[in-house]
Image: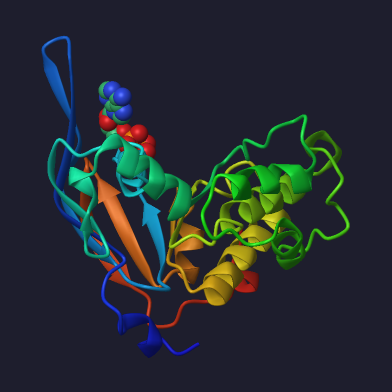
């Protein structure tokens, strides 16, 4: 695809010198240490780094689940680091789609009901049937999570995220609980979602192989983005060797 259209509109999320520390037992842990980034419309960003390097802390700030101790975070022109709790709640409900490693579907609701529940708290939601079709599950709508494979459950959780018509999609180890075949299918789907919705996708992973599909890779270490790698030619999901 042509990347120029991506860069035209300015950043969707901008972090400036974001720091998040935790105090406890007289020690201060700097989980995130003066991190700055810009995420552009339609970008596929992979955040790569060892356990404890600050990936989840950064994703939690991006998703409005946490606030920085210092620094500024902007969502388009709005300074979300100054948002009230109510504004942050609206931001999480309306602007952000989340995908988790262990799916977190409600076991007593069908695939369609799980997706409808997310749609019901969001302004401007899409239809549950339409997004389940988009993720290739039109024949699984009435299944409960326990009646689906891990790969299918992750598809439902992606449908649940995109039914909100999100401005940004955040994924925390989305392939961490899947075998190689399903992992590749999920990466392929995330790339398709980016194409269809045009929203940026930010995904945390331990798996360096996934970085090959990204437009840019944020390498993290000790609470910092130590390197930003730009892929001139991101590969297709099918080319990944899991
Ligand atoms: P990653 O996602 O890369 O594994 P995290 O963002 O979870 O890293 O953690 C970064 C650092 O911050 C780690 O040293 C972790 O122990 C610490 N940390 C994360 N959350 C908390 C918390 N709620 N209280 C204290 N320390 C935390």
Coloration of the structure image:
rainbow
Q: Considering only vertical position in the picture, is 199 above or below 31? A: below
Q: Considering only vertical position in the picture, is 27 above or below 121? A: above
Q: How many marks?
A: 0
Q: Nearer the viewer, residue 135 or 234?
A: 135
Ligand 1, image quadrant it occupies: top left
Query: Seen in the image, is 236 located left or right of residue 96?
Result: right
Q: Where is residue 110 shown, x and y percent of the image?
A: 80, 40
Q: Residue at x 56, y 49 (%)?
A: 174
Hey, which quadrant is residue 238 in on the image? bottom right
Q: Residue at x 13, y 23 (%)?
A: 28
Q: Residue at x 15, y 35 (%)?
A: 69
Query: Seen in the image, is 70 located left or right of residue 184?
Result: left
Regarding residue 51, the answer to whether it shows in the image is: no
Query: Seen in the image, is 123 located left or right of residue 142?
Result: left
Hey, which quadrant is residue 129 in on the image? bottom right
Hey, which quadrant is residue 32 in on the image? top left
Q: Nearer the viewer, residue 68 or 182?
A: 68
Image quadrant holding the C terminus, namely bottom right
Q: Where is residue 194 shown, x and y percent of the image?
A: 52, 70
Q: Considering only vertical position in the picture, is 174 above or below 189? A: above
Query: Seen in the image, is 179 located left or right of residue 66?
Result: right
Q: Where is residue 31 shown, x and y percent of the image?
A: 23, 34
């Amino acid at each position: 695809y042509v990347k120029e259209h991506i860069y035209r509109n300015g950043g969707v999320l901008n972090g400036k010198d974001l720091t998040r520390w935790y105090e406890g037992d007289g020690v201060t842990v700097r989980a995130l240490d003066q991190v700055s980034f810009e995420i552009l419309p339609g970008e596929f960003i992979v955040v790569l780094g060892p356990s404890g390097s600050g990936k989840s802390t950064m994703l939690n700030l991006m998703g409005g689940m946490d606030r920085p101790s210092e620094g500024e975070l902007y969502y388009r022109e709005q300074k979300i680091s100054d948002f009230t709790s109510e504004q942050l709640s609206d931001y999480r409900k309306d602007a952000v789609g989340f995908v988790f490693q262990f799916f977190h579907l409600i076991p007593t609701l069908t695939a369609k009901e799980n997706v409808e529940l997310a749609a019901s708290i969001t302004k401007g939601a899409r239809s549950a049937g339409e997004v389940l079709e988009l993720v290739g599950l039109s024949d699984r709508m009435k299944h409960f999570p326990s009646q689906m494979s891990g790969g299918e459950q992750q598809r439902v959780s992606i449908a649940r995220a995109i039914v909100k018509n999100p401005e940004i999609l955040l994924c925390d180890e989305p392939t961490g609980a899947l075998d190689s075949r399903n992992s590749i299918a999920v990466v392929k789907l995330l790339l398709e979602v980016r194409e269809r919705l045009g929203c940026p996708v930010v995904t945390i992973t331990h798996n360096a192989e996934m970085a090959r599909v990204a437009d840019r890779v944020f390498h993290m270490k000790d609470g910092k983005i130590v390197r930003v790698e730009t892929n001139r030619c991101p590969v297709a999901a099918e080319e990944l060797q899991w």
